[in-house]
Image (cartoon, helix red, strand yellow):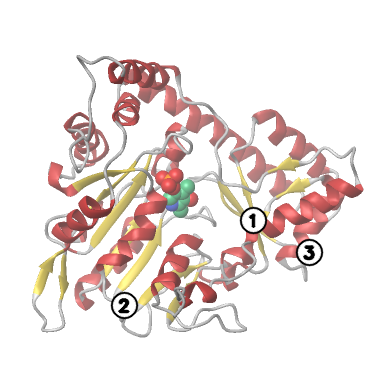
Amino acid sequence: MSVKINENYQLLKANYIFSEIDQRVEDYQNDHPQSDIIRMGVGDVTRPLTPTVEEAFRNAVREMGDPETFRGYGPYQGYDFLLDNIIEKDYASLGIKLERSEVFVSDGAKCDTGNIQEIFALDNKVAVTDPVYPVYVDSNVMAGRTGPMGDDGRYQNLVYLPCTEENGFVPELPQEEVDLIYLCYPNNPTGTTLTKEELKEWVDYARDHKSIILFDAAYESYIREDHIPHSIYEVEGAREVAIEFRSFSKNAGFTGTRCAFTVVPEELTGYDVDGKSHNLNQMWFRRQTTKFNGVSYPVQVAAQAVYSPEGQEEIKKTVDYYMNNASIIYNSLKTIGLKVHGGVNSPYIWVKTPEKMNSWQFFDLLLENVQIVGTPGVGFGPSGEGYFRLTAFNTLKNTEEAMERLSKLAI
Ligand SMILES: *Cc1c(COP(=O)(O)O)cnc(C)c1O
């Protein structure tokens, strides 16, 4: 006998996009040692933790080193001081009422969006928007919910909802019945949003079909336009059909600190093979308490500080900083005649590649001519072909320099 692997892992696409990008950049750099490459591809932030957050973090670390204030394992779902801030400031302010038992503090929206599929059966039909944040797809591949990827870049048994210029990046309701629907708004990678009316169609679909929407709102704090919903629970009936994921990564610079949370309303219901209904909140509680022991106390204190008046003021500046970059990128690309999407309620700018050029050709063009690195859209799914993602997460100086270079590019 020998140990057998989880064969589903064999189905994962071998060349993860970011390693291919790194390879091409490295090759270029080796050939051009003098070149000054500006990276606008990766989705990591650059602004540090703000002073208020850092100070709270430090003080909490000190508490951990003092026998009088030391804390061991925390409450399963997170400390009340953080839960109450989330409930008050993220949701009550929108007119949404949540109980502490409905909020689960975690170490990342990536983990939660990747793990959530565990509480659902393998024969559920899963729908994803295309292009898509790869975590939703790959976690379902690993679990065995798909077949292999076909030549069209689509995994068998997964329902793709194309989001392109043709439909204004608004996914159409699926023709076939689907059980789990991943939506991410403001969207990564396209930077586009859904209005409340557009989101309502999905909520209504889910209510009609007894489906569940997995709503990733990691970029909620980038919303600038008043008519764009900040939470799916702003839509009537969403509490019956939606799980919402949020994170401190993109608004407060927690990508290396790790804190996020997931909202699982008490009304959410799934069904067993006999058609009997089950409470999904309890299932997620069971899952988390079995496999996860919570976010460290100092990190939760740091996250709480994000909600203080000073913290709010500071993170607003952080987000404003990136959004200023976003508008610089957006306007510069428009000026040179490219078709641009996103960038208004999101740090992502989704560019249509020029006539007859595919995603990777445009990648090479920018790398070789202006030494700018972005992400080929096709890496996010087949409908991303012909598009290219730039992020606003670089410094202002680099963003300005990059756009200065681009302005001289003849397209
Ligand atoms: C960055 C990002 C997250 C946040 O992940 P964390 O694990 O909280 O850092 C979640 N969803 C999307 C789509 C993202 O781009």
Amino acid type at circle 3 is Gln
Are discs 2 and 3 less than 8 Å apart at CB? no
Are discs 1 and 3 less than 8 Å apart at CB? no
Amino acid type at circle 2 is Leu
Residue 262: x percent and y percent?
A: 28, 49
Q: Nearer the viewer, mark 1 or mark 3?
A: 1
Label 1 or label 3, whichever comes before in sequence order: 1
Tag 1 residue? 18
For disc 3, does the CB lie below 8 Å from ligand 1? no
How would you rate the neighbour count of disc 1 (Cα within 10 Å): few for under 14, some for 14-19, many for 20 or more?
Answer: some
- From mark 1 to mark 3, how far is it between C-alphas? 16 Å
Residue 178: x percent and y percent?
A: 32, 78
SS class of the residue under badge 1?
helix
Amino acid type at circle 1 is Phe
- From mark 2 to mark 3, how far is it between C-alphas? 38 Å
SS class of the residue under badge 3?
helix
Residue sitting at 35 percent across and 26 percent down? 302
Q: In the displayed structure, does residue 351 sit left or right of residue 160?
A: right
Tag 3 residue? 361
Q: In the displayed structure, does residue 66 sit left or right of residue 286?
A: right
